Amino acid sequence: MKDEIFDIETDINIDRLAMLARFTLSAEERASLSEVLKKMADYTYPRILSEEKALPFSFVCAEELCREDEPQRISEEQRSIMLSGCPSLSEDYVTVPQVINGEEE
Amino acid sequence: MKELISLNLRQHVEGLAKKEYSAEELTRAYLQRIEDTASINSFVTLNAEGAIKSAKEADVRRLSGRPLSAIDGIPYGAKDNICTKGIRTTCSSKMLENYIPPYDATVIERLSAAGAVLIGKTNLDEFAMGVSTESSMFGTTLNPLDLQRVAGGSSGGSAAAVAARQVPFTLGTDTGGSIRQPAAFCGVVGMRSTYGSVSRYGIVSFSPSMDIAGAVTYNVADNALITSYLCGKDVKDETSFSLKGDICAQIGSDIKGMKIALISDIPDGAVSPEVKRAMDLSVERLRELGATVESISLRHAMSAYAVYCAISCAEASSTLARFDGVRYGFRAKGYEDLDSLYRRSRSEGIGKEVKRRILFGTMVLSSEYKSDLYENACNMRALIGHELCEALSRFDAILLPTAPTAAYEVGYSSMLSFEACSDDIFCALAALAGLPAISLPISENGSLPVGVQLMGAQCSEAKLYRIAAALEKGGEI
Amino acid sequence: MNKYEMTVGLEVHVELKTASKIFCSCPSAFGDKPNTNVCPICMGLPGALPRLNRRAVEYAVTAGLALNCSISEISYMDRKNYFYPDLPKAYQISQYDVPLCYDGYLDIGDDKRIGITRIHIEEDAGKLIHDKNGDTFIDYNRCGTPLIEIVSEPDIHSAEEARTYLKKLRSILLCLGISDCKMNEGSMRCDVNISAKPKGQIENGVRTEIKNINSFSFVAKAIEAEFARQTALLDEGKVIYRQTRRYNAASGKTESLRSKETAEDYRFLRDPDLLPVKVSREEIERRRKELPTLPHERKAIYTQSLGLSEYDAEILSADVGLSNLFDKCAELTAHRKTLANLLLGEILRLSSEEEFSCPISAEHIAGIADLCAEKEINSPTAKKLIARLWAGESRTPAEIVDGEGLRQIRSRDILLPLAKEAIAKNAKSVEDYKNGKSNALRALMGYIMSRTNGLAEPKTAENLILELIK
């Protein structure tokens, strides 16, 4: 475990994070977000460190109640509200631009 | 009709039962009030026609002597991240500006089953991320007690609507304080009950291990009444369970001999003078009421906000990934391929604050930082949970501030650095451990109210309401 | 002789045959109209929450036990985060660090054991259809179909071993009745992890993953092709990159699927929407007891108790439908060898290749076996009976035989004059036989057969001829 506030300056790869989260950032956003992420990490990291290893803690009181394997369709009304909200529907298919995969090396 | 809107929920329960007025009259009165006080910007969508129709149906039931429940015909507002069938549910985000859910959230179903009348949807910080409702695409909700100030957040619309007497109660959601902090800012009562006691089905998720819906009301007794309708095991939510017993039952009983803890680890500078004063006043009143108040040390308490940041952002980065412009919601124009469809839709459809949290959460979970940030945060969360549970096995409740300050001026928080705007430092504790906590206003001659909160052991709602009701009454003396 | 050796591990995805999906109540069906078996949960609508289907867990535990795994009494559901249009929530609910089943194995030969690292449960994604105009059409019907992923140890060292492993795995899963295992419908799919290294080298080479192969023969071909690609690179002294590839059946080659720049980081986390998956000790033991007799156990019974050949037993036991039918028939007739011949011959020939099925009742098949073994009918008649019964004939085999006079003629009194006639009319063949051409007997037998419409019992007829010309 690292015992000092870790240096994130050189490590934060804002472009990679934006790629993983599927955002395009303006130059301004890149700069300000890099800075704020660093601040958040600098604030967070030292405060969550502990030498102590906690025993498991569950904040969930739920009793177990598994679903039985019984099929049930939603109503046609619900289905039509659901599909009508789709930005591009073609003959009940949701459509997007061609998924590209398989570029030859 | 001014009189009608000045009554509280329990008074309406009585008024309707005695047929002093009809649900339709009541609903029209509140709709008028909403129109008259529209400048606070608490509602984002009104359901006026639907509400009047529901109210008329409630009146028919009343007349035939078969009301669905005590609250049959009473209007309410619901935070706009709670799904309502056929009524747009926006989360105050461009991403869902025109989104119409095909189903009702379980809390809405439960209130409908009791006959309550949905009057409209209330404003919030985008996707419930924020403490001032300033990140809403519909603009900031103003504090009805002082229009220069914010109503808090993220359930700012819900708190302001109750404070402005636009409805007798609203539903909010609380992830790290989003019911309690705006309730505190607006001088009303907000409760987050034990994690899982209220179904999350249909609540647009932000951090599913902490999210919960709850009620905002004028007073403690009203709050307990609504919460009793919201609670219950829901087969649609695996993490839900049913609270045993009547949570309203202890209200009115005294609190002599009860043991209340204060957290000694909160540094003096952590709260404003008026909050400090409100805490002192509360302690005084609790003692007057026969409770003992004692300071205890919770070593990890001041880490709660850091843990909350890491975990809630991590969960949000995953939970909000579904907003990708493919199946519903906003899809940007002018994309060239799938990647630009994703990136443009998300970049244009999601606001700055939410983006920041998603990116931080992405970082927290990324292979480079997961062990440092996510795993340590989970460990610390468990330490905090054990510590709180241990303390609450010895005490009936912990008393702590709801927020570090009273409501601040619009625009103030955006000038602050990330650390300084950590309004949730106190609220995060109950959220992390899944504990119930209620915020109630402590006001002193004319100044802005300040909220204090009482946090109890898991499933101790009935006792918390009892203590809160006593403290509230004490305030009236 | 190749100077390299391959190391292969397989990840097999199998759709479970539950009635509803793994996290919602939508029917889990194949071939319905697009986006009809969908709901807020499997479409990932805001606010919708998953609920685990208990039967999916039961099926996975059963698979784990049949594959000699340990079962976790508590395991967890995790989110695997990545964007793809077939994945509505932009994360797949799967199991990451604590799978439901672990540490198992599957024997694919007398001395070849393939380790099973783990079996976990997860949800399937939707289906993408690409058209020529540059659009992709998405059907979410398959979204949320329960899957188990069976991950093997890298214990496989040839394409043939991979194929055998898959066949054995499939026959076990079919025997358990938990999946259709139809590779052509995608209910069984395979990812191959493969690396090459110089023979004798201890350390494994850099591995690549070939995704989503949907037939046994493509798996074998993909392995051969990728091994050839890797060894060619090694020969040239080039670097092999760790990457995801796919098999192009048209070119017979593997090709790169994703560039390194967009490599995903799945950022696994426990799914807070779902409770830990609990399976009690008692339930595990109960399911262990309830396991059906598995193919390798059936094979042992067939060879050891029923005296079938290794070869017949292997084929019979590999297909659960065939094996079940054999077991049923074997209770009704003592002539198991004849029964095996009937099933593995004419009946297997008539059944479709994809899935064994047979419309003839066990009673009738056993009846035919009895008639055959007791020499009441000959094999052409047996074939004829099977064809008739397959086509829906309602009489019993014995009724057909008697009604149409199909019984073999075993009476020496009837056959003796015919044998004499055969000898008298085929002097040349008799001569040839006596000169050592045993083939010549055929002409004599042929004569008797043609005179009896093929119903003469061959052994009796042959004996008579031999007695007469000796």
Image (spheres, coloured by chain):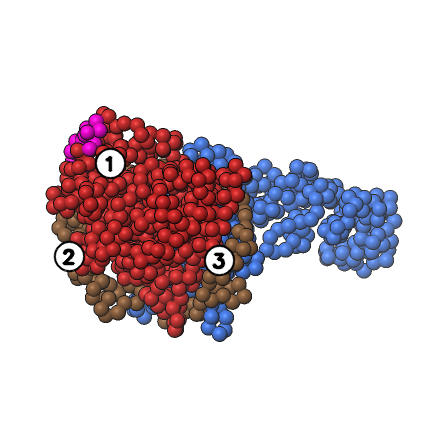
Chain colours: A brown, B red, C blue
Amino acid type shown at disc 2: Asp
Residue C410 visible to the viewer: no
Q: Amino acid at mark 3?
A: Met
Instruction: Indicate whether residue C180 is drawn in magenta.
Output: no
Task: Report the magenta residues as a range.
Answer: B285-302
Helix or strand or loop: what does disc 2 sit on? loop
Query: Which residue is depicted at the point 20% across and 33% down?
Result: B285
Choose mark 2 or mark 3, whichever is in front. 3
From the viewer's perspective, is C389 left or right of C176?
A: right
| Residue B296 covered by magenta stretch | yes
Tag 1 residue: B476
Q: Where in the figure is residue B192, as x and y percent of width and height?
A: 31, 42
Q: CA distance from mark 2 to mark 3?
A: 47 Å
Identify the mark nearer the N-term, 2 or 3: 2
Q: Nearer the viewer, residue C178 or B122?
A: B122
Disc ID at residue A7: 2
For residue C167, side relative to residue B160 (left or right):
right
Instruction: From the image, tell me which residue sits under label 3.
Output: A82
On screen, C339 above or below C31?
above
Question: Relative to the observer, which residue lies in front, B139 or C85?
Answer: B139
